[in-house]
Amino acid sequence: MKVLVTGAAGFIGAALVRTLRARHPQASVLAFDLVPPDAAQATATRVGDVGEPGVAAGLVDPDTTHVFHLASLVSGGAEADFERGMRVNLDATRELLEAARRAGGSPTFVFASSIAVYGGDLPDVIDDATPPSPRLSYGAHKLACEILINDYSRRGFVDGRSLRLPTVMVRPGAANTAVSGWASAIVREPLAGRDYDCPVGPGTSMACLSLARTVDAFLHAAELPGDALGADRTTLLTGIAVTARQMVDSVRRLGAGRRLGAVRFAPDERLQAIMDRLPRAVRSARAARLGFAPSASIDEIVADYLAADDAPDAPDATPGRAPA
């Protein structure tokens, strides 16, 4: 088993590399990103920009069995810088697909897509029948890549599968440029004892999935036979609907015994408008049929975060201190 993981220094990528090595200790795992991945977790690491001509060709060879392509410039970043978004999200994916085609090994190619492919006037619950209609450049890039992966799979160049991810939480450390970054910060910051000004209203809902469930989904996708997926290699992953207020309530329940930072709701007009155009809940019968498991509740997501090594320490509780 010879594996390439792009975006390996990122939130999901780093966890995927760790889990791959734990479950497949004999596997050769090349971790690639713009910044150095954790060398202790992978067999080998490389640093570079996969969108630059010629870089992908040096990452995939005839013996490569699996490619997990997670590298991307997320929603807010792609909106702010159109050219960079095209290069990182679209050009890099095509470079990797071409590298796989030229290598000739037809590797299993697992792509991190997004529910950002949906937009416009959306129903309360997105499902498998909801047509994609992106309203952000990031979503347009992801949809274009899904189509390419379907065609490269049809031609036998790769054995592709794309996962449309809901919001994955809880992201540790500093926020990235995703418009959904508040959904991690509203959990992470109070648990670390820091106050947080939430840039959306308390009723703002996100379709959410835990990091652990997401990593499991990538590995499960890689193990599925291509025939089980059919001509359309894209699967929408179920994300449970959770409001900002419910996230705060979960922190209060599971953070008992910690001194919690306060949350103040201070909606940003531009961000709120974007959030109001994104799916609020996602339900996929196809994902269930294929064996992908959703998170059970927001409490499960927060509990998973608290149990992880990345969860911050916080001082003991102080009476009267709690999220707003």
Image (cartoon, grey):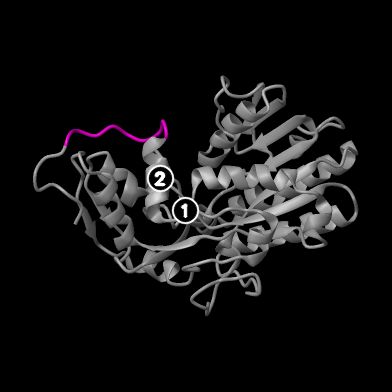
State the CA–CA distance, disc 2 to disc 1.
Answer: 8 Å
Quadrant containing the N terminus is top right
Quadrant containing the C terminus is bottom left
Q: Secondary structure at mark 2?
A: loop
Q: Is residue 291 shown left or right of residue 188? A: right
Residue 151 position, x and y percent, is 84, 58
Q: Is residue 313 magenta?
A: yes
Region of the chain picked out in magenta, as a range? 308-316
Residue 28 position, x and y percent, is 72, 24
Residue 176 position, x and y percent, is 45, 46
Q: Indicate the amino acid at tag 1.
A: Ala
Q: Tell me if residue 174 can be seen.
A: no
Circle 2/circle 1 CB separation < 8 Å = yes
For residue 139, above or below residue 20: below
Q: Indicate the amino acid at tag 2.
A: Ala
Majority SS type along the magenta span: loop
Mark 1 residue crowding within 10 angstroms, few (<14) / some (14–19) / many (20+): some
Q: Where is residue 229, by image quadrant?
A: bottom right
Q: Tell me if residue 19 can be seen.
A: yes
Which residue: 54% across, 35% down?
A: 15
Residue 311: image tag: none
Q: Is residue 123 shown left or right of residue 242? A: right
Residue 175: image tag: 2
Residue 178: image tag: 1
Which residue: 86% across, 42% down?
A: 106
Q: Is residue 206 shown left or right of residue 289? A: left
Return the residue nearer the eye: 172 or 223.
Answer: 223
Q: Is residue 314 magenta?
A: yes
